[in-house]
């Protein structure tokens, strides 16, 4: 798990999933951010593979700014998220799209993520693993 600023809020449980093709944010995360679910764009489809054997209805989609790093060395990208009503230990799950946009390079054995910043490499280490 990594930390990021998403939609102007510090988000502490960010999971980077290189096998996932979309970015997910959970409805309870948006409620905690005080983002009304009525502001979501329609995204009427079901999604499989989040919970084995179950199809999950997506509530909608929205774009949010995502910032990794510290004030002296950070990267900001605007990412599209699909919103799901599903309990999770994470606040968001970022997929391959996020890796590509941030030019992030994961190292799964060391639970580390690196990406270029304007003033050098931005490194994250997951100490909770």
Image (cartoon, rainbow, N blue to C red):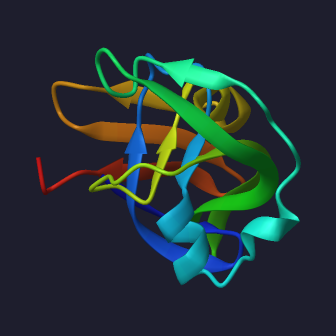
**Residue 23 appears at what percent x and percent y?**
60, 37
**Residue 123 appears at what percent x and percent y?**
41, 50
Position of 10 with respect to 71 (left or right) is: left
Above or below, 71 relative to 77: below
Using the image as rendered, state which of residue 37 and residue 16 is in the foreground. Answer: 37
**Residue 71 appears at what percent x and percent y?**
63, 78
- Camera sees residue 71: no
Above or below, 59 relative to 97: below
- Camera sees residue 19: yes
- Residue pictured at 64% horizontal, 30% vertical: 103
- Residue pictured at 75% horizontal, 46% vertical: 60
**Residue 5 appears at what percent x and percent y?**
59, 70
Using the image as rendered, state which of residue 14 and residue 77 is in the foreground. Answer: 14
- Number of marks in the image? 0
Position of 108 with respect to 84 (left or right) is: left
Using the image as rendered, state which of residue 124 and residue 6 is in the foreground. Answer: 6
- Residue pictured at 56% horizontal, 22% vertical: 47
- Residue pictured at 66% horizontal, 38% vertical: 102
Position of 95 with respect to 114 (left or right) is: right
Using the image as rendered, state which of residue 3 and residue 46 is in the foreground. Answer: 46
């Amino acid at each position: 798990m990594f930390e990021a600023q998403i939609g102007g809020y510090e988000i502490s449980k960010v999971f980077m999933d290189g096998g996932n093709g979309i970015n997910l944010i959970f409805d309870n995360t948006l409620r905690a951010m005080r983002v009304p679910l009525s502001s979501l764009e329609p995204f009427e489809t079901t999604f499989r593979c989040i919970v084995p054997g179950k199809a999950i209805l997506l509530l909608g989609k929205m774009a949010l700014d995502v910032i990794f790093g510290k004030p002296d060395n950070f990267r900001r990208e605007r990412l599209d998220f699909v919103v799901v009503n599903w309990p999770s230990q994470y606040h968001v799950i970022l997929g391959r799209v996020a890796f590509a946009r941030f030019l992030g390079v994961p190292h799964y054995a060391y639970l580390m993520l690196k990406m270029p910043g304007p003033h050098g490499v931005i490194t994250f280490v997951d100490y909770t693993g």
